[in-house]
Amino acid sequence: MKKIKKTNAARILDDLKIQYELKTYPVDEEHLDAVHVAKEVGMPPEQVFKTLCVRGDKTGVLFAVIPGNGELDLKALARASGNKSCEMVHLKEVLPLTGYIRGGCSPLGAKKEYPVFMDETCRLFDRIAISAGMRGMQILAGPEDLVRATRATVVMLTM
């Protein structure tokens, strides 16, 4: 059995004594979307949450954590985060800002601790999946534990 190398995100959960499972899956460069990842880890897409890097006009960079099959409502995020408007961070900026690449962005363990806003549908499940901070690995944990670990504000973020 191959030992799984822990990511910074997993070590943060360890430090907080939060129970979680690391689930690995084969990376397909052509299909980095959360719906594909959900299929790979055997969970419904609405239970596999993707982390989007967003910039607010007043607050700067923040993370929106939404269901894999959901679409971010930028107006709802702006309202929740105290911004007039929000826009997606350009892909080429994500790595320098967060330390993460597309398909491996986690709300835990980024270069800086950015504010996290998590879609309220996370509370519909006993466990949800988020990126462990690298392609090919997901963290499965209780939503309330992840809310606590990320210090997330839980609001409706999807259309």
Image (spheres, helix red, strand yellow):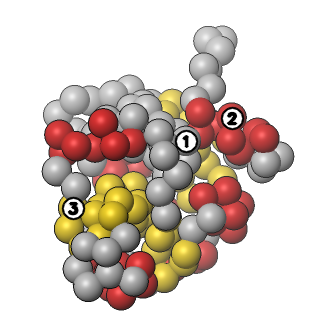
Q: Residue at x 47, y 39 (%)?
A: 111
Residues 103 and 45: in front is 103
Q: Is mark 1 on a helix, strand or loop?
A: loop
Residues 77 and 25: in front is 77
Answer with left or right where residue 5 lies relative to residue 88: right
Answer with left or right where residue 13 lies relative to residue 57: right
Give percent across and percent down for residue 156. Answer: 43, 84
Could you tell me which quadrant the C terminus lies in? bottom left
**CA distance for labels 1 and 3:** 20 Å
**Residue highlighted by disc 1:** 109
Q: Can residue 159 be seen in this view?
A: no
Q: Which residue is drawn at 71% across and 44% down?
A: 13
Residue type, label 1: Gly
Q: Which of marks 1 and 2 is nearer the N terminus?
A: 2
Give percent across and percent down for residue 95. Answer: 30, 36
Above or below for 152 versus 68:
below
The tag on residue 88 is 3
The tag on residue 101 is none
Answer with left or right where residue 7 lies relative to residue 56: right
- Disc 1 packing (10 Å; few <14; some 14–19; many ≥20): many
The tag on residue 11 is 2
Residues 36 and 81: in front is 81
In the picture as drawn, the residue positioned furthest to the right comes out as 17
Q: Earlier in the sequence, mark 3 or mark 2?
A: 2
Give percent across and percent down for residue 25. Answer: 44, 31
Could you tell me which quadrant the N terminus lies in? top right
Asked whether disc 1 touches disc 2, contact meaning CB atoms under 8 Å apart, the reply is yes
Residue type, label 3: Met
Residue type, label 2: Arg
- Disc 2 packing (10 Å; few <14; some 14–19; many ≥20): some
- Disc 3 packing (10 Å; few <14; some 14–19; many ≥20): some
Q: What element carries label 3?
A: strand
